[in-house]
Image (cartoon, rainbow, N blue to C red):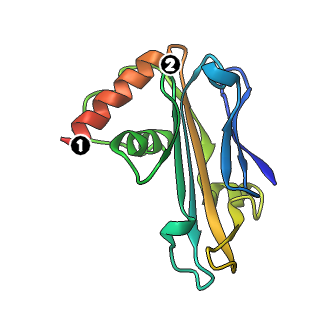
Amino acid sequence: MVREVVRCPYCGRVSAELDDARVGLRVLGGRRGPCPHAAFVSVGVTGSDPAGRPDDALTWLWLWTRGRGLERLPRLTPLAEAVDLVACGIPVEGGPPLDAEYRAAGMTADERDDDAPGSGTVALVAPDGRAAEGLFDGHGLYAPDPAALVAALRRWAAWSAA
């Protein structure tokens, strides 16, 4: 099944889709990205083995950044964490100010399930062929000046990593 990940709150264009048949992320809009407002798209699928235990082999993280493109991350990076914290509205004290106008969009797996039961989970296949399940989170950060937002989040990520 192909699922909409996130839609721009400024222009309404879909930014990315998750194909859970092959666990792949497709950022829409070609080489320049989803829309002129997109600064970041962050997606995570956190898989569990058939017994419900977290399984790194069934976990995928992606971050699309304006000016850099799409990356599959081997682990959560300070920049990806900053994007997720800001998108979820989790305040971060003591860091540099986020001095760029922005809007966040997207949902956590729990929010997706609250909105439409079952939409926050994806069916996966474990390396041994058994059926498994993953939780699907996807967020985007958008701005009239996405380059300014990218620079502001990079400053925050550098501060948090120090």
Q: Nearer the viewer, residue 44 or 93?
A: 44
Residue type (three-letter) at the residue carrying disc 1: Ala
**Residue positioned most to the right:** 1
Position of 1 with respect to 34 (left or right) is right
Q: Earlier in the sequence, mark 2 or mark 1?
A: 2
Q: Nearer the viewer, residue 69 or 37?
A: 69
Mark 1, secondary structure of its residue? helix
Give the residue pinned by disc 2. 146
Q: Nearer the viewer, residue 51 or 105?
A: 51
Residue type (three-letter) at the residue carrying disc 2: Pro
Position of 72 with respect to 24 (left or right) is left
The residue drawn where x is 70% and y is 61% is 113
Residue 3 screen position, x and y as percent: 76, 48
Q: Is residue 13 above or below residue 157?
A: above
Per the model, the C-alpha gap separating discs 2 and 1 is: 22 Å
- Label 2 Cα neighbours within 10 Å, binned few <14 / some 14-19 / many ≥20: many
**Residue positioned most to the front:** 128
Name the quadrant of the N terminus. Answer: bottom right
Q: Are discs 2 and 1 less than 8 Å apart at CB?
A: no
Q: Is residue 102 above or below residue 80?
A: above
Residue 110 screen position, x and y as percent: 62, 60
Mark 2, secondary structure of its residue? helix
Res 152 label: none
The residue drawn where x is 46% and y is 20% is 101
Q: Nearer the viewer, residue 51 or 109?
A: 51
Q: Quadrant of residue 116?
A: bottom right
- Label 1 Cα neighbours within 10 Å, binned few <14 / some 14-19 / many ≥20: few
Q: Is residue 26 above or below residue 58?
A: above
Res 161 label: 1
